[in-house]
Image (cartoon, helix red, strand yellow):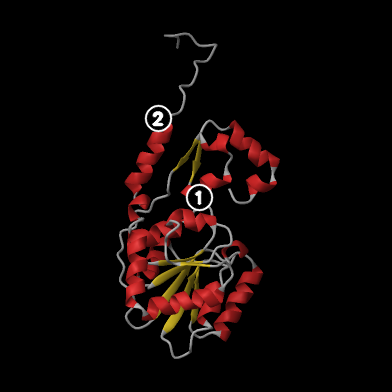
Amino acid sequence: MYRDIRDYAEARQSLGMATRLIVLQDEGLRELSPALRLKTSVVYQSSDVKRRHAPDASRFRVAVVGHLRDEKDPFRAVMAVRRIGRAAPVEVLQIGAALNREMRTRSRGWRKLEPRYRWLGSVSHGAAMRWLASSHVLVVSSVMEGGANVICEAARIGVPVLASRVPGNVGMLGRDYPGYFPLFDDKALARLIERCRTDAGYYKRLRSALLRRRALFAPGAERVGLLRVLKTLPARPRSAGRRRGSG
């Protein structure tokens, strides 16, 4: 959505060949021409996670969930926490495998530099959801995002999200969501983390804004959306070589 169809003619051609298109969040429609939008539906991904938000009372936990790679800008949260006074009871909990040697080296470097940073590496989905549910906020700092499933999971659990202002995140959370920061701006992210930690009114407003989106990510809503698209598909023509009633 935010790379291939801009750069490759073959990707754009595939959109023209498709009978119907599905995008995972409503800002995705803006990437398409008016003609393509006519055959495009928005169907949000869903999550059936059953956990509820129960943040750790001993510290303000910032979760970052996703495999470590450049397009996720994975160390922006720990960069932000470095800007917060050392006396503040804040920690960054990073979950996800390092997909290359550079990411592994950088993560190990941050562990030595910042004692409030923990990298758990790759864990099971169940364990990741337990850690997410025990966190005060989720940071999604992506440079490019089609529609992060971890946002669906955070919304279903009730964990407020702080997100980079890129189309894929805005399409998931809504244009009026109060938890965005500019891309690559750890100073702005640090301010948001501190505001969440110290301003109960803002934290409540952030959580309420997320919960208003919660129903979008319910499994039933995704099922209805997919069935709606399927019902608009034209009937398949009968094969020219088959006759009614033939074996």
Residue that label 1 marks? 27
Q: Residue furthest front?
A: 176
Residue type, mark 1 in image = Glu
Look at label 2 and name its amino acid.
Answer: Lys
- Tell me the CA gap for discs 2 and 1: 24 Å
Q: Which quadrant of the figure has residue 33?
A: top right
User: Of 191 and 172, which appears nearest the observer?
Assistant: 191
Q: Residue at x 44, y 76 (%)?
A: 193
Q: Earlier in the sequence, mark 2 or mark 1?
A: 1
Give percent across and percent down for residue 200. 32, 77
The outermost residue toward the bottom is 87
From the top left corner, tell me how far across and down residue 15 is, in percent. Answer: 59, 37
Above or below 93: residue 246 = above
| The quarter of the displayed image where residue 52 is located | bottom left
| Residue identified by numbered label 2 | 231
Secondary element under disc 2, as helix, strand or loop, is helix
Vertical order, 31 against 69 (above or below) = above
Residue 212: % across, % down: 33, 57
